[in-house]
Amino acid sequence: MNQGTPDYRDSGLEFPADFVFGSATASYQIEGAAHEDGRGPSIWDTFSRTPGKVLFGHTGEVADDHYHRLDSDLDLMQRLGLESYRFSIAWPRIQAEGTGPANVKGVAFYSRLVDGLLARGITPIATLYHWDLPQTLEDAGGWTNRDTSYRFADYAHIMGEALGDRMAMWTTLNEPWCSAYLGYGSGVHAPGITSGRAALTAVHHLNLAHGLGLSALRDAVRKPDAQYSATLNLHMIRPARDADGEALPASAEAVRRIDALANRAFTGPMLHGAYPADLLEDTAHVTDWQFVRPGDLELTHQPIDVLGVNYYSTVTVTMWDGVSPRSNADGHGDAAGSPWPGSEDVEFVQQPGPYTAMGWNIAPDGLEELLVDVHEQFPTLPLMITENGAAFDDEVRDGVVQDDARIDYLRRHFTAAHRAMQRGVDLRGYQVWSLMDNFEWAYGYTKRFGIVHVDYDSLERTIKQSGHWYGELIRSRSIPE
């Protein structure tokens, strides 16, 4: 069906004039200034200061110091030629304890950011929640507490009023799968809880927050052409195969189970207004789902203009035989708890390489398949790649970062996106992750995703060769030769 090279190393493929090329970041990963201008502590401040939770005890206290280097970072975006910039707002910078009136200095920072982007011809895309929940709300139960969803709506209303006259696109949540399952299930992300029931409770309250937040935004925003979205890290799930390439008989059931937990637990309520029946059955021994109250799904099921899709790699699954050692190559490492409540008998099979520095397999065909699959499920819903990129071990040599592996990765994934569009997918844009090297959550500063290198001692920025390559793609609107 595809035309072009079988390895996705195409060049010269042209993108439409209205296709938006940008890059993405997240507040806790880049901002620093953790204790300044009224910002309160987040769950990631607490988690990263807890011994043993983050590699080498790294924290986001300083990160890339973006808070103090805003203007020069905006100039850097302009040098790269970015057409859009997807950033997240730190909730505890707006409401130190997650409730109450807005912190004027916090709002002013994001207002300056948006104005700076617009002055440079860059479209702002704001994410309201990229995992930095105010610690005070976590102390009251966090996403296991229904009230957090309503506090999120209050926060969304504040931001809608503050920036709604200028913001092109609003995203409620980034990757609620990670917030729920890694934060409350496996415990490898903040707040570090290991409970299947807590994880599924968080799933629902995040879904509810999405719907309440959208309603609050639409009530507050006074920009008729503003767009509204959510970003999901939808999993591209593949069946394990035998030596002849045939799918193992047990893998179909494993694919169904993981698809329910990873994908349909969010697309069901958000886009269909219902949880999948098989998800409820699979997890009945974990929770009775009584936290879903009458009317919740109507509140959650709100229209969106764009669905954000984050993609990095694929997973391969089959049912575990209960005897042989269980493979758990799901990309998230071993943990005290499981990010797959109710499906601990599913086995995640090691996938063939090559791999990025994260140990994730490089599979551009997975991106094409995922985009086509989502389009077939929701044919009238426009999509945007809101994160895609790769970590590699980059070094500055004579002032140059020659990251050929990342250029190759991006070339192959832009090719995949283009092929998906040729197959009818309504894909509106592509936000490369990440603008800069940054605090990579539990990996601290050991993984570099940026198209801009950051020296964590001097905080000097150096555009990598991948950044220059991307700039050429943006200028020419075609994949460079």
Image: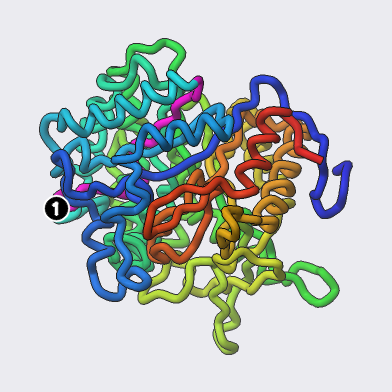
> Looking at the picture, how far across and down is residue 288, in whole percent?
32, 57
Image quadrant containing the N terminus: top right
Which residue occupies 68% across, 42% down? 469
365 vs 67, nearest the viewer: 67
Which residue occupies 54% across, 44% down? 387
Residue 16 found in image quarter: top right
Residue 270 magenta-drawn? no
Left or right: residue 93 compared with residue 52: left
Residue at the left extreme? 100
Left or right: residue 404 compared with residue 230: right
Query: Over which residues does the magenta segment extend?
Result: 121-137
189 vs 415, nearest the viewer: 415
> Which residue has dot 1 on it?
140
What colouring does the structure picture have? rainbow
> Looking at the picture, how far across and down is residue 192, in whole percent?
29, 65
Residue 379 found in image quarter: top right
Left or right: residue 378 compared with residue 96: right
Residue at the front extreme? 398
Left or right: residue 293 compared with residue 357: left
Image quadrant containing the C terminus: top right
Which residue occupies 56% across, 55% down? 259
> Looking at the picture, how far across and down is residue 20, in whole percent?
60, 27
Q: What amino acid type should be assigned to the residue bearing mark 1?
A: Ala
Camera sees residue 67? yes
The image shows residue 77, relative to residue 459, as above or below, that is: above
Camera sees residue 278? no
The image shows residue 107, relative to residue 398, as above or below, that is: above
Residue 133 magenta-drawn? yes
Which residue occupies 60% across, 36% down? 430
SS class, disc 1: loop
> Looking at the picture, how far across and down is residue 282, in whole percent?
47, 61
For label 1, count other residues whose C-alpha is less than 10 Å away and answer few (under 14), some (14-19) or many (20+).
Answer: few
